[in-house]
């Protein structure tokens, strides 16, 4: 891939690169100048999908915060980033607008069908984040270290597999930054709708 190129769409080698990476990162921020910028790693195999040439999605699983959801609900801005830890150096960023599609949304079931490579049930699926790309760029990645991917950790599935909808909602209700973000923005709507 050429260094520092802007792309019109996600296809060909660019799409292959994105889909082959075992981890990606999401970045969001509130509108407030003194709000907290959020950067999160994502990496459960099969939980990311390219829906079309300009639309990406990932499964949003249980965790101790809901900053990304809160920021998307407030302003929709999001950047996704992939970097090559193996093979030729490369970094790809997709800047766009995102939306959290919750479990009671009529689109949820169809979107979930776009992730055939993962069983979301043991992970406490909260939402599906859909991102529409506005700017797609790559850069060199020369300073990203070479690292090997061994395997996915099973800790997340082991932790959340024992939860049902009611206990998962109770878990989220106990956490300080699920229903409201660190900056006080609305986060995950609770209680969770049934899965």
Image (cartoon, rainbow, N blue to C red):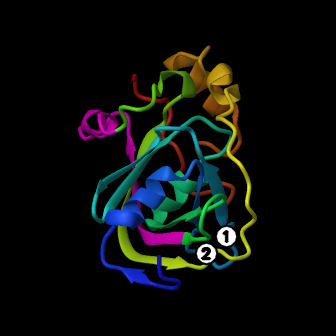
Circle 1 crowding by C-alpha within 10 Å: few under 14, some 14–19, many from 20: few
- Residue 170 to residue 89: above or below: above
Find residue 31 and report its horizontal and vertical position in percent.
Answer: 55, 74
> Which residue is under mark 2?
32
Give left or right: position of 129 versus 37.
left
Q: Which residue corresponds to the image point at 41% horizontal and 66% vertical from the top-left?
A: 14
- State the SS at label 2: loop
User: In the figure, 48 relative to 136: above or below?
Assistant: above
The magenta segment is: 92-114
Residue closer to the observer: 143 or 106: 143
Q: Are marks 2 and 1 in contact (CB under 8 Å)?
A: yes
**Where's residue 173, x and y in %?**
63, 32
Which quadrant of the rendered structure holds the C terminus?
top left
Which numbered marker is on residue 192?
none
* Whether residue 38 is visible: yes
Residue at 52% from the left image edge and 70% from the top image edge: 92
Visible in this render: residue 73?
no
- Residue 64, compared with residue 130, is above or below; it is above
Rendered location of residue 182, percent (x, y): 69, 56
Mark 2 neighbour class, 10 Å CA radius: few under 14, some 14 to 19, many 20 or more: few
Residue beneath label 1, please?
35
Q: Is residue 10 left or right of residue 19?
A: left
Q: Observer-nearest residue: 81 or 67?
A: 81
**Is 2 on the left-hand or right-hand side of 15?**
right
């Amino acid at each position: 891939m050429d260094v520092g190129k802007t792309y019109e769409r996600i296809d060909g080698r660019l799409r292959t690169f994105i889909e082959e990476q075992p981890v990606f990162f999401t970045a969001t921020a509130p509108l407030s100048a003194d709000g907290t910028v959020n950067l999160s790693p994502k990496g459960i195999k099969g939980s990311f999908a390219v829906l079309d040439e300009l639309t990406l999605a990932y499964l949003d699983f249980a965790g101790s915060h809901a900053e990304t959801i809160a920021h998307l609900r407030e302003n929709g801005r999001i950047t996704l980033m992939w970097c090559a830890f193996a093979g030729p150096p490369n970094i790809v960023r997709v800047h766009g607008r995102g939306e959290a599609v919750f479990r009671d949304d009529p689109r949820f079931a169809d979107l979930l069908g776009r992730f055939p490579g993962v069983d979301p049930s043991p992970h406490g699926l909260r939402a599906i984040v859909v991102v529409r790309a506005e700017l797609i760029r790559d850069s060199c990645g020369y300073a990203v270290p070479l690292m090997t991917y061994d395997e996915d950790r099973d800790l997340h599935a082991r932790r959340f597999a024992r939860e049902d909808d009611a206990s998962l909602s109770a878990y989220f209700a106990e956490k300080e930054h699920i229903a409201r973000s660190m900056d006080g923005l609305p986060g995950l709507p609770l209680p969770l709708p049934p899965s």
